[in-house]
Amino acid sequence: MSGKAMMLKSTSEEMLNLDFLRFYASAAIVWHHSHEFLIPEAQRATAGERTAGLALFVDLFFLISGFVIAHVYRGRVASLPQFGRFMQRRIGRLFPLHLLTFVLAVAMWAVIGRFAHADHAPSNDPSCMVRTVFLAHAIFPGCNGLYYNGVNWSISAEMLMYILFPLLSLAAVRARGGGLFVVLGFTAFVAFLAFRVNDTARVWTDLYPPIRALPSFALGVSASYARGLLARVRGGSWLTVPLVVASTVAAMIGAPGSAQLALIVATGLSAIAADVRGEVLPLVRRLAPLGQLTYSVYLWHGFFILVLLNAAGDKLLHLSLAPMVALMMFTYAASRSGATCHGATSRHRPGAGLMACSAGVASLDRRLPRSAVDARTVATRRSRQPFRFRLRAALPIKRDSKRKRVLRHDQA
């Protein structure tokens, strides 16, 4: 596949800092799930407990998602038909790759079970598999927490956040900018309850998934309605990179869980403030297009880690540190390559995707959905629908080229 065909370009200049954070967070999650293979087996349990805070980058995903969804769908979930279209688009965006990776995970574990004994194999209980297929396993947990391609628990939790989005959006509209402080207080309260006995990151990551996702997602939604307030924050672009590095260091050294969560929240809000002001560092601008690969890297990386690092490198070949580092770099590159193929073929007809990818047909310029509907018109005009969420004049939506560029994040 030619380099020109695979070249990524930012689909919008509006959220480059958030795109950079999405890419960085996905890389941190890959590192979280793979760095144990660089450590002697006897030390892995201790090291894994100390670096459990790397999993908090998933909470950064929730925060970014809340902001982007609220920004794109502002005033576009004001009625039941609009909410139905919103859910249809989110399902259409998330489910195809989820179902593909689920089927491949079932096949892969069937092969593993035929030739080797696995201590942590996913459950084959039909109810568990059905819940996983329909992304309900984080909402109705069970099966000892072992699911096929288990990283999709966060996608399950996010689907529930989408269902709650109209209510969160309505609350944010009524609270206006003050909603940001309300949600910050709510997040601090939940964190206090979680960390009051044991201030470690593991306490937060072990929370019931929807409870864990709600504060971060709601924080992103409220930040979208407090852009005027965040626009007053200067230097957000200069804060974002140091804060995300500090978050990584804090996770690696096992800092208190409350401090790690505070750093994650500060990182997300600083990036939002920078994007609102249009401040972008050259490094961030260069890496931002990689944010388009986040979802695919997140769902694919477990396969490469399990097969290449765990089975081949660690169990079969017993590689030393240097070859394992090289194999880890190859694993991450393979995850990105698979993600790029997925993005390249998402616009092709079903059944032709893999052929198109292998043939080098790669176009990552995703088309826009329909133009946004003016929320003030939706909220005030007469409708035959008996139920709808009334979002009034607090939702200014402009039909201009700038707004259309923002809508591209509907595909993110």
Image (cartoon, rainbow, N blue to C red):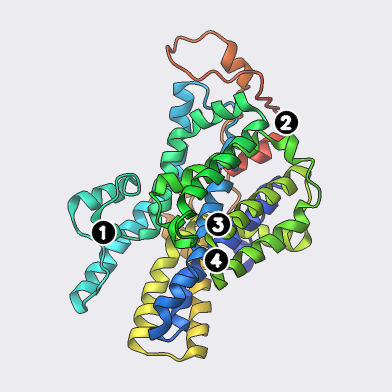
Q: Which residue is mark 2?
A: 400
| Side of 239 where 192 appears, left or right | left
Disc 1 on helix, strand or loop? helix
Q: Nearer the viewer, residue 9 or 351?
A: 9
Q: In this view of the protein, can residue 91 be seen by the observer?
A: no
Identified by mark 4, the residue type is Ala
Residue 258, numbered label: 3
Q: Secondary structure at mark 3?
A: helix
Question: Upstream in the sequence, badge 4 or badge 3?
Answer: 4
**Relative to residue 276, is residue 129 drawn left or right?**
left
- Marks 2 and 3, how far apart at CA: 42 Å
Q: Which mark is residue 294?
A: none
Of pointers 1 and 3, the one earlier in the residue sequence:
1
Identified by mark 2, the residue type is Asp
Compare residues 235 and 19 and report the one nearer the observer. 235
Earlier sequence position, callout 2 versus callout 3? 3
Q: Please identify the quarter of the rendering in which residue 376 is found.
A: top right
Residue type for callout 3: Ser
Q: Mark 4 near mark 3, Cβ–Cβ under 8 Å?
A: no
Question: In what element is the residue under mark 4?
Answer: helix
Tell me the CA gap for discs 1 and 4. Answer: 25 Å
Say which residue label 1 marks.
144
Q: Which quadrant holds the N terminus?
A: bottom right
Tag on residue 28? 4
